[in-house]
Amino acid sequence: MAYLWTSIKLQFRIPVSIFFSLLFPLIMMFAMMTSYGNFEIGNGYHFIDKYFLISTGMGLLPISLISFPICLGESIQNQTYKRLEYLGIGIPSMIISDIFAYILLAFLSLSINIIFGFVIYDLHIPSLVYLVAYVLQGLYCSVVFLILGALMALFVKNTRALLPIGMSLMFSCYIFTGAFSTFSKLPETFQMIGKYIPMKYVMNDFFHIWTEDKLVLPNLLTLNTVLGIGLTIIVVLFFVITRKRK
């Protein structure tokens, strides 16, 4: 628990990540609501009930693709884990604490987005069951991207390169998931690529959960699980090969 609290505090030492995770989504929401207005889209729902899904995805991606890889990469490069191990702190405990800290940050980003939309723009809030389903599936999506972020930290030895790589991946995901335009109006090639990015479902298809039409999205769960298992296998193989070389 002590290391978990330390890991949480370390997150707030990366200003770029905090800005994109917590502030940028709210700024974009404010800009879009101010520009287009909170017009009705049918069945009692308004533009905010659609757009807040996009701003949620905008907040979740930087946590996994920028903040986590930089933190993990610096810990590996500076041999922080190894030094703490000499003090009797197990490496698995430290890594698990880091992962939970970033899951908590993802939950905070998601919660702030919902609260801001509800207080300022009267965002519709579904029943508790659908709200919990929305949060859990959103966090599950974030976990898969955290594994991708871990791979970035393991393969990119220069921590200074992690920021531009993470920013490039993040904005690429924004483009292919329809963050800057309606997904259905994207070129067919972009839409095809977007269907294989889990965050596309968070930023678009989660509207079915929010309107209580569907409790789960099978396509997302299947894609997420397959990618999660595949990325985890790569991480395990990396550690096995690295230990054999040593």
Image (cartoon, helix red, strand yellow):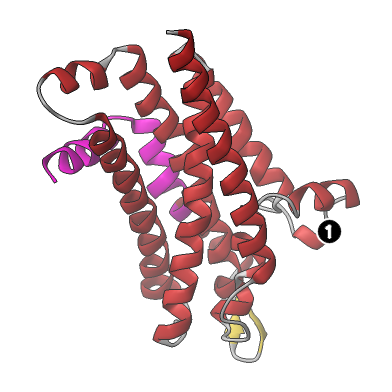
Front position in the image: 89 or 193: 89
> In this image, 94 relative to 194: left or right?
left
Labels in figure, total: 1
Query: Which portion, as a residue range, is magenta?
Result: 1-26
How far across and down, in percent of the image, does residue 196 sit? 73, 50
Q: To which residue does mark 1 refer?
A: 185
Residue occupying the point 66% across, 61% down: 222
Judged from this view, the residue extending furthest toward the top is: 246
Front position in the image: 61 or 49: 61
Front position in the image: 222 or 6: 222
Residue occupying the point 58% across, 75% down: 216
How far across and down, in percent of the image, does residue 5 sit? 16, 43
Q: Is residue 219 above or below residue 103?
A: below
Residue occupying the point 36% across, 58% down: 107
What element does badge 1 sit on? helix
- Residue 26: name its quadrant: bottom left
> In this image, 99 relative to 206: left or right?
left
Residue occupying the point 69% across, 66% down: 219
Type of amino acid under label 1: Lys
Q: Main secondary structure of the magenta part?
A: helix
> In this image, 65 relative to 193: left or right?
left
